[in-house]
Amino acid sequence: MKLLAELNSIIHPMNIPIETGYFSGLPPDEYMVLTPLSDRFDLFADNQAHSVIEEVRISVFSKKNYLPIKKQLTKILLQKEITITDRRYIGFENETKYHHYAIDVMKEYEMEEN
């Protein structure tokens, strides 16, 4: 997915660890997980798809105040012309002591010629 690669390059300079699917190591106090949500064709002409829409959930986990990360990430995503479709506080996880905040994003890409 192009969007996963783009999000990784956008988030990397924030110096917050990021992984796809789940965090595999010992999680730090703040980290992010990217979860692909959908990968669908759109804009049909002559029965051919001409673009693909990709959607990803960015899960922010923080033992501290998650609001600065939310603000910085939202600003970066909008600057990079990535559409934010939803933002929501998922909750506080008592077992792990992490706040979980999710930002769902989407982006449309033109189909590549094979």
Image: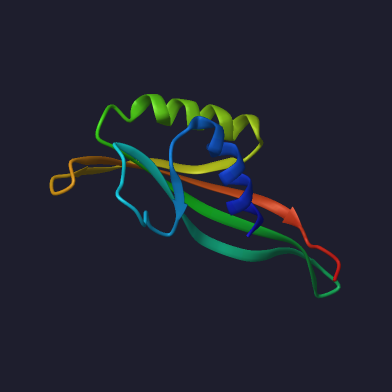
Question: Where residue 32 sits in the image (x, y, percent)?
Answer: 41, 44
Choose between 114 and 41: the one closer to the eye. Answer: 114
Write the residue at 13% across / 49% down: 95
Check the picture and name the quadrant holding the C terminus. bottom right
Choose between 63 and 45: the one closer to the eye. Answer: 63
Horizontally, is 54 left or right of 111 in the view? left
The image quadrant of residue 111 is bottom right
Write the residue at 66% across / 55% down: 2
Q: Residue furthest front?
A: 26
Write the residue at 43% across / 59% down: 21
Horizontally, is 94 left or right of 4 in the view? left
Question: Where residue 76 sits in the image (x, y, percent)?
Answer: 57, 30
The image quadrant of residue 103 is top left
Check the picture and name the quadrant holding the N terminus. bottom right
Number of marks in the image?
0
Q: Residue furthest left?
A: 94
Question: Where residue 106 sits in the image (x, y, percent)?
Answer: 58, 49
Horizontally, is 90 left or right of 86 in the view? left
Question: Where residue 52 sits in the image (x, y, percent)?
Answer: 69, 61
Q: In the displayed structure, would residue 40 be above or below residue 58?
A: below
Horizontally, is 88 left or right of 72 in the view? left
Q: Residue furthest bottom?
A: 47
Q: In the displayed structure, would residue 73 be above or below residue 53?
A: above
The image quadrant of residue 67 is top left
